[in-house]
Amino acid sequence: VFPDTQMFMIVDDRDQPTYNWIVDLVFRRRAYSEYSRERTRRKVQSEIRTFLNQKASRLREDHGMDHPIPMRVRKQQERQQRIVQIAQQVEARQQEVTAK
């Protein structure tokens, strides 16, 4: 369902509408089964996310690719970069004000 370029990616980096479509499809199929009482959409989504991440990890290992930085770490790095940028902007603005 996903293009070849996305097969190596973690779920958070993939095409989200396609991912949501898969989750909805699997959830609807399981909703008609006997086990629907115990299955919530969140549980199905978690199972699919785990499966796709494990499959991508195995593909990366088979092809000798590096593993991506986890989303949590990437978000933290982006936050730190924004903090540094804002601090630089504030410092530059203070220098402008003191120069006047």
Image (cartoon, rainbow, N blue to C red):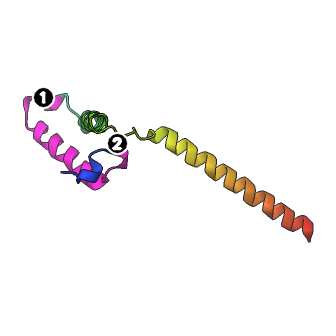
- Name the residue located 45 percent from the left edge and 41 percent from the top edge: 71
Residue 33 on the magenta segment: yes
- Name the residue located 28 percent from the left edge and 52 percent from the top edge: 5
Q: Which quadrant, please, contains the C terminus?
A: bottom right
Q: CA distance from mark 2 to mark 1?
A: 28 Å
- Name the residue located 8 percent from the left edge and 29 percent from the top edge: 34
Residue type for callout 1: Tyr
From the viewer's perspective, is residue 90 above or below residue 56? below
Q: Nearer the viewer, mark 2 or mark 1?
A: 2
Residue 7: where, in percent of width, then height?
26, 46
SS class of the residue under badge 2?
loop
Name the side, left or right, on which 91 lies relative to 46.
right
Q: State the predominant SS element of the stretch in magenta.
A: helix
Q: Dot 1: within a 10 Å radius of its alpha carbon, few (fewer than 14), some, or many (20 or more) residues?
A: few
Q: Quadrant of residue 94?
A: bottom right
Which residue occupies the extreme left position in the image? Answer: 33
Q: Dot 2: within a 10 Å radius of its alpha carbon, few (fewer than 14), some, or many (20 or more) residues?
A: many
Q: Quadrant of residue 31?
A: top left
SS class of the residue under badge 1?
helix
Residue 17's tag is none
Residue occupied by mark 2:
10
Name the side, left or right, on which 8 lies relative to 74.
left
Residue 23 on the magenta segment: yes
Q: Which span of residues is magenta-colored?
A: 12-37
Residue occupied by mark 1:
35
